[in-house]
Image: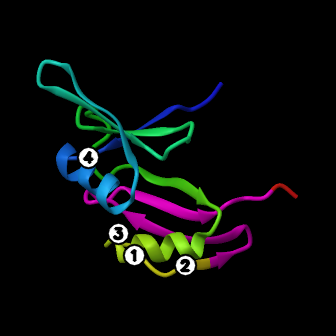
Amino acid sequence: MDVTVVSVPVSDQGVALRFWTEQVGLAVVRDAEFAPGMRWVQVGAPGAATTLTLVTWFDRMPPGSLQGLVFEVDDVDAEYARLARAGVPFEGPLRTEAWGRQAVFVDPDGNGFVLSSRAHAG
């Protein structure tokens, strides 16, 4: 069993889509109406098994309520620098923890994401 889609609660799908594609660098997987007046906006990294859908329809998931979703990368220092140059807002600099290096960034709604060095099995 795989996790394939994670719902990210947003207030404006257009703003969120621009953030994830233009600043973070994800690709549009799907952007289409799926019910009258409802838009399915899905983004992901090429080749990744898990994608994000930018949702506005879950009453129990208000914009900004998602916290702690982790993005693992091979070179966290380079990715942190790239995202910072693209204007992605980080809550602070990269920190070294017992499990690796990480920094927290937020989307326009305040959802929080962790940029982390890739965990290596040991």
Residue depicted at 24% across the width and 31% down the height: 57
Residue 10's mark?
4
Of callouts 1 and 2, the N-terminal one? 1
Q: Quadrant of residue 82?
A: bottom left
- Measure the alpha-carbon separation of dots 3 and 2: 14 Å
Q: Is residue 90 above or below residue 35?
A: below
Numbered disc 4: secondary structure? loop
Whole-number angstrom distance, CA of label 1 to CA of label 2: 11 Å
Residue 81: percent from left, percent from top: 47, 77
Rendering coords of residue 120 (x, y %): 78, 58
| Quarter that holds the N terminus | top right
Mark 3 or mark 2: which comes first in sequence?
A: 3
Q: Secondary structure under badge 2?
A: loop
> Gap in Å between the C-alphas at discs 4 and 2?
26 Å
The span from disc 1 to disc 4 (Cα, nearest Å) is 21 Å
Image x and y of residue 12, in percent:
17, 47
Left or right: residue 10 versus residue 120 is left
Q: Which segment is the magenta one?
A: 96-120
Circle nearer the N terminus (4, 2): 4
Determine which residue is flagged by label 1: 84
Query: As rendered, which of 18 and 107 lies closer to the eye?
Result: 18
Query: Which residue is rendered at x = 55% and y = 74% of the image?
Result: 78
Any mark on residue 94, and which? 2
Query: Of the residues under marks 1 and 4, which one precedes in the sequence?
Result: 4
- Tell whether label 1 touches label 3 (CB within 8 Å): yes
